[in-house]
Image: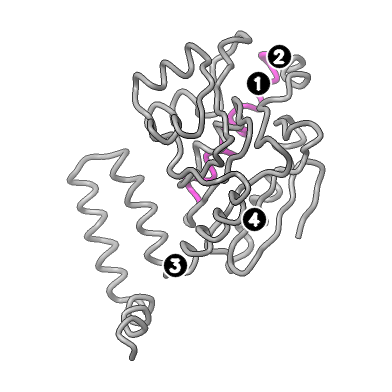
Amino acid sequence: MTKSKSLDFKVQDNVGIITLDNAEKFNVVGRTFFEELRDVQQEVLANDTIKAILILANGKHFSAGIDLNYLNTASSEVMKERLVGYQQLYSFWETLPIPVVSAVNGKCIGSGVELILGCDIRIAGEDAKLSLPEVKIGLSPDMGGTTRLTRLVGYGQAKRLILSCDEISAEEALSIGLVERVVPTEKLHEEALKYTKKIASYPSNSLRFAKKGIQVAQESSLAAGLMYEEAQSIYCCGADDIKQSINMILGK
């Protein structure tokens, strides 16, 4: 278990739980957060017992986004040196072979939204309010907001949310595909953990290949996607996972 200024990390069964834990400052994102997130990600990579990740937050709000005090000191030179590395921290969730679930409560603003955009499945509490207000303060989303949001919700909705800085409810986020599930806020963490544990109970090979296959399908041609499916099927059918799982289902 790791506890730092901004984050808490623990492993429960085979699920790695990352908790945004700076509720007094509404879980804002800044340099300290990024440094601690990088450390946690290295712990995740070093622990081969983890089969899924859950990201959640303590306090009434998931994240108020970028720390404006930090942003106010970030010159063009500073961002040129740091931003690519920061972007890689959010891209990490997509490239990680295991599934990543996020549980969103209260306000989820700017960089907080960009954090969950890199996750595989987003679960929102009924009280969740999501927005990308960067344009309002003279910036465009720079941690995957314009890229991942467009892929997730489509061209028109991405323009509406980013250009107008509209705040949307959990139900509207569900209707446009920004989140995949909405649950009662008081049961959010419980339901999200149960859901993540269910996913983590499946064979490692199939989880890994299914996640990658969906990404290949989104980023390449139909032919390339089918070729990937063929390759993963040939591999999986020769692995122990499938035989063990089938025998368990058949009661053998």
Q: At label 2, which amino acid type do we have?
A: Ser
Q: Quadrant of the C terminus?
A: bottom left
How far across and how far down the image is residue 133, in percent? 58, 17
In the image, residue 213 above or below residue 61: below
Question: What kind of element bears circle 1?
Answer: helix
Mark sitting on residue 204: 3
The magenta segment: 75-96
Is residue 12 located in the magenta-colored stretch of the structure?
A: no
In the rendered structure, the answer to whether residue 209 lies left or right of residue 128 reads left
Which residue lies under the disc numbered 2? 75
User: In this view, which residue lies farthest toward the bottom?
Assistant: 252
**First-in-chain label (3 vs 2):** 2
Question: What kind of element bears circle 3?
Answer: helix
Mark sitting on residue 79: 1
Which residue shows up at 53% across the image and 63% down it? 197
Q: Crowding near pointer 4: few (<14 within 10 Å), some, many (20+)?
A: many
Spatial CA distance of label 3 from label 2 is 43 Å
Q: At label 4, which amino acid type do we have?
A: Ile
Question: What kind of element bears circle 2?
Answer: loop
**First-in-chain label (4 vs 1):** 4
Mark sitting on residue 17: 4
Spatial CA distance of label 1 from label 2 is 6 Å
How far across and how far down the image is residue 81, in percent? 66, 25
In the image, residue 75 above or below residue 21: above
In the rendered structure, the answer to whether residue 156 lies left or right of residue 171 reads left
Residues marked 4 and 3 touching at CB (< 8 Å): no
Q: Crowding near pointer 1: few (<14 within 10 Å), some, many (20+)?
A: few
- Name the image quarter holding residue 38: top right
**First-in-chain label (4 vs 3):** 4
